[in-house]
Amino acid sequence: MKPSEVLCVDTTSDKPDLKNMTLDEIESFIAGLGKQKYRAQQIMKWMHQAGVTSFDEMSNLSKTFRAEIESQVRISSLIIEKIQASRDGTKKILFRLEDNNCIESVLIREKNHWTLCMSTQVGCQMGCRFCLTGKGGFTRNLLPSEIVDQITMARFNTPEGDNIKNIVMMGMGEPLANYKNTVQAIKIITNDYGPAVSPRKVTVSTCGIVPMIEHLGNDTPVNLAVSLNASDNETRNMLMPINRIYPIESLIEACRTFPMPRRRRITFEYILIAGVNDSPNDAERLARIMKGVPCKFNLIPFNEYPESEFTTPGDERIDAFQNVLIKHRYTAVTRKSKGRDILAACGQLRGQVEKHENVS
Ligand code: SF4
């Protein structure tokens, strides 16, 4: 196979980017050069496990072989523009892409490890009304390399990087609106010679693009999270425009049939917004419509930001909502968003560089 025939050729260079390729694709490319397949494993390990960005550093490949591949392909790399630390330990990493757009990832501290919340698009076109990311509009899809490199760069450039155990695709963008590149990135991230994250530790979060949920279940063994945020169509239509195309009933049906090993559950994220979706009646209806779906709930009190049209419910209201779900034997956890002081909390990623900084 010629390098130009591999999937996901990017437009920023004439040469295809090796970081966009799965192991199979690199093997085909290497075989086309008359070399043994195991060389592909070595190259992948250099890129994703050693974090090298030049062929010169691949010391177990001969000089002539390095020159040969370098004449045909390249290795891209994200640039870390800034890392901000929150008072609660959360870290936000601002990455610059080759076309000068910026995206963000967030490192979230768990008990004994870290979770990396990754972006899949520059901006987002889904227009969820509570989300600051969506308000910034949509610029473009990320390439597989740009999705994968968020974990490689975080691993090599932060002290927490070694201990990243979970990946959640819950940052900027809707992963299922960038389906092909997201699935390609998952294949690379979970490969033993790539970042080697177990598929059980990867979660894709969607606002509810129903047909793609089914595809995701067939194409990958990852976990599914759904940003639900309402238990009736009227409220969800108001909060999330995608619901006008794929109403709650169709979304829940897609979740019901999502292929999962026994004991795995779908996570439903529910942002609690004062006076909008946070009443005990809302919770009762939620418990009813979810009957039979293997699931758990993450309840996230809305993060207020300057000029936000919504407000955070009081603690009593949040507890009452949670207790209704628990009464119906669901697992329901209230997650106070982390990183609020650095705008790294749920729905607050913007990928912007402050204007006073030199962005050239
Ligand atoms: S909540 Fe997710 S899908 Fe909705 S606008 Fe924000 S980033 Fe996009």
Image (cartoon, rainbow, N blue to C red):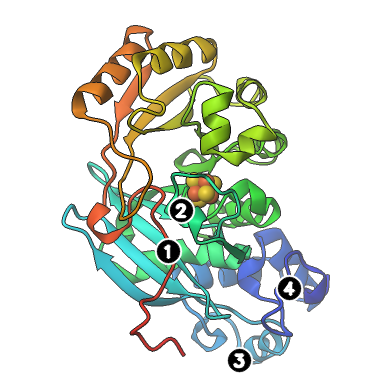
Mark 2 vs ligand 1: CB below 8 Å: yes
Q: How many neighbours does mark 1 have within 10 angstroms: few (below 14), some (14-19), or many (20 or more)?
A: many
Q: Which residue is mark 4?
A: 30
Q: CA distance from mark 4 to mark 2?
A: 34 Å
Image position, residue 220 (x, y; %):
64, 41
Left or right of 114? Residue 202 is: right
Mark 3 vs ligand 1: CB below 8 Å: no
Judging from the image, what secondary structure is the residue with disc 2 in?
A: loop
Task: Determine whether label 1 and label 2 are within 8 Å by CB.
Answer: yes
Q: Residue at the far left: name it.
A: 87
Is residue 30 visible to the viewer in this orientation of the structure?
Answer: yes
Image position, residue 12 (x, y; %):
67, 81
Residue 68 placement: quadrant: bottom right
Image position, residue 129 (x, y; %):
49, 44
Sequence order check, earlier mark of 4 and 3: 4
Q: Specify the amino acid type for callout 4.
A: Ile
Q: Specify the amino acid type for callout 3.
A: Lys
